[in-house]
Structure formats: C-alpha cells, structure tokens
Image (tube, rainbow, N blue to C red):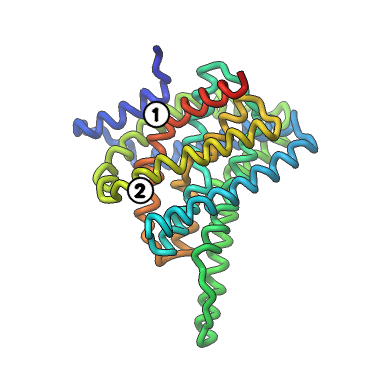
Amino acid sequence: MQLDVGIAFFLLGVIATLVRADIKFPKGLYQSLTLFLMIAIGLKGGVALAEHASWNLISQSIYVILLGLLLPLIAFPVLYFIGEFKRYDAASIAAHYGSVSVGTYAVAVGFLEAQNIAYEAYIPLFVVLLEMPAIAIGIALARMKKTTKDSSENSQQTNDKYKLLHEVFFNQGMVLMVGGLLIGLVAGDRIERVTPFFFDLFNGILALFLLEMGMMAARRLDDIKRLGSFMLAFGVGMPMVGGLLGCFLGLAIGLSPGGAILLAVLGASASYIAVPAAMRVALPQANHSLSISSSLGITFPFNVLIGIPTFAVITQWITG
C-alpha cells in the first residue's frame, strides 16, 4: 500500500515537531504558500469555468450555498445545548465549521489526481461560494437585539459593520480566489504563460504547505488536551456529518464521483484563515482560540489522514 505524498509530508512535519527537530521555515513562507494555493486554485477553476459554464452550474451553485447555510445551523445547537458553550463561542465555532479550508481542498485535489480520479475542474467556484454563508449565519446566531444609548455607540456599530463587510467580501482568500477565477475565465490561451508556475508546481508547493501544517498541528497538541473530550468528538464528528451531506448533495446535483468527493471534503473542512479574521471583527467577545485549535489541531489532521480517503471510499461504494 502506497502512502500519498502529501500525507507523507504532513506526517513528516508532525514527527519532526514531536522529536523536536529544529526545522524553521523562512519567515513569511507559510503565508506565501497559502497565497500561491489560493491563486492556483482560482486560476484552475476559472479555466474550467470558461470551458464548462452552463445553466446547470447555476442550480448547482444554489444548492452548494444552501449547504453552507445548513452546516453552521447543525453545528450550533450541538455546541450550545450539548457542549454548553457560551452563545458567542458556539456561534463562532459553528461559523468555522460551516465554511471551508482551502488547504484541505488542495490536499483533496492532490489525492484525487494521485488516484487518477476525474472531477469537475470548476469546483473552485464552490470553494468561493462556501466562504460567506457560514459567516453570516454565525453572526446571526450570536447577535442579540440591543438598544443603544447614544450616537457614539451607533457610530461604533456602523464602523464595526463596515469592518465586517470588508473582512467577509475582501479577505485575502476571497480576493485571490475570485481574482484567479476571473483571470482564468478571461485569459483564454494566454493562461499558458503562467501555467508552468501555478499549475505544474502545484503539488510541490502543496507538499511544502503540508509540511508546515504538520508542524503547526503538532504544536497544538497541548491546546487539544485542554479542549477536552467533547471538542475532540465534535472536531471529528462534525466533519463526518458535513462530509456525508456534501457527498450526497454532490451526487444528487449530478457531480461525478470525483466531484462528489471534493464537495464532501468541502463540507467536512473547517476554516482557519478567512473565518477567524471575520469573527474577530464581528464577535470580539468570543474565545477564538477554541475555534482555531479545533479546526487546525483536530479537524484538519483528521481530514488529511482519515476523512479524505474515507469520503473517497464511501462515494465510490455508493456509485458502484
């Protein structure tokens, strides 16, 4: 049995940290790798969108947005009523699990390509669409009706709304992926000028990204211990629920088995880039370390090591 190269690099990062190997990425490299993956995913989606745009894609996109609205509504009552988290904390965590992880999606793409499993190349559009709904639902779940006492409070609330809208619509992931989509959509044959960098080097850059992610996940082991058994169960159980919903939805709206696997991975992933930034603006009262520790320390490793192969097996079993 061969081990996927991306997973191998992730495990290398985990082991290197656990044995206290002195491996240090150059400052800013992780951010650069993240930016590269966002642009590359957007470009690939834009090229595919130019080739496969259809009315059917519009209906598929609507269903995907509904999935993004549903996931935090599933997560919130579990966290609030069973986990007994404060309302702000439950809403913030739910928003993370309703949104998507670009890194997890990139790993899933690498996995499918290594397994020679075909998929719809326009699915990066769904990555973009799933960024926003969960943020809106999370804020709605957290906010209570308040009466303001003076104009200064109203002014502050207005400023907060502008900051929030900016984080939701103009965060780095949204700008780079949407920008990449548009460039890939309109560039035509001229996209070949950048394909050697953004397309051919994708798997190599992904390997470096996963090496760093493995080290980051291992560094959060102490945080995971502090979260307790409930968050550990939630960090594994919620991805399985979201993944199965994504898989069934993908097959129901006519995606190929590979496309359904990717939608399952999107449903199972939890954001650790775009949503944290938005939640810090919208819900400053929330304990944001809970969300990051869970999404990055529990759910990301689970999806990389277990979730993605499991969703592939389940989807292929369903489709025969």
The residue positioned 55% from the left and 80% from the top of the image is 154
Quarter containing the N terminus: top left
Front-most of residues 8 and 257: 257
Residue denoted by label 1: 305
Earlier in the chain: of badge 2 and badge 1, it is 2
Residue count near mark 2 (Cα–Cα under 10 Å), binned few <14, some 14–19, many ≥20:
many
Q: Answer left or right for 222 relative to 258.
A: left
Using the image, determine if residue 213 lies above or below residue 91: above
* Residue at mark 2 to residue at mark 1: CA–CA distance: 18 Å
Q: Label 2 is placed on what type of residue?
A: Met
Q: Label 1 is placed on what type of residue?
A: Leu
| Residue 15 visible in the displayed image | yes
Q: Answer left or right for 58 relative to 6.
A: right
The percent position of residue 250, horizontal first and vertical second, equals: 64, 34
Front-most of residues 171 and 75: 75
Residue denoted by label 2: 231
Label 1: element kind: helix
The percent position of residue 193, horizontal first and vertical second, equals: 63, 27
The residue positioned 40% from the left and 63% from the top of the image is 286
The residue positioned 66% from the left and 28% from the top of the image is 120
Residue 140 in which image quadrant? bottom right
Front-most of residues 76 and 280: 76
The percent position of residue 163, horizontal first and vertical second, equals: 53, 64
Q: Are marks 2 and 1 in contact (CB under 8 Å)?
A: no
| Residue 201 visible in the displayed image | no
Residue furthest toward the right?
55
Residue furthest toward the front?
82
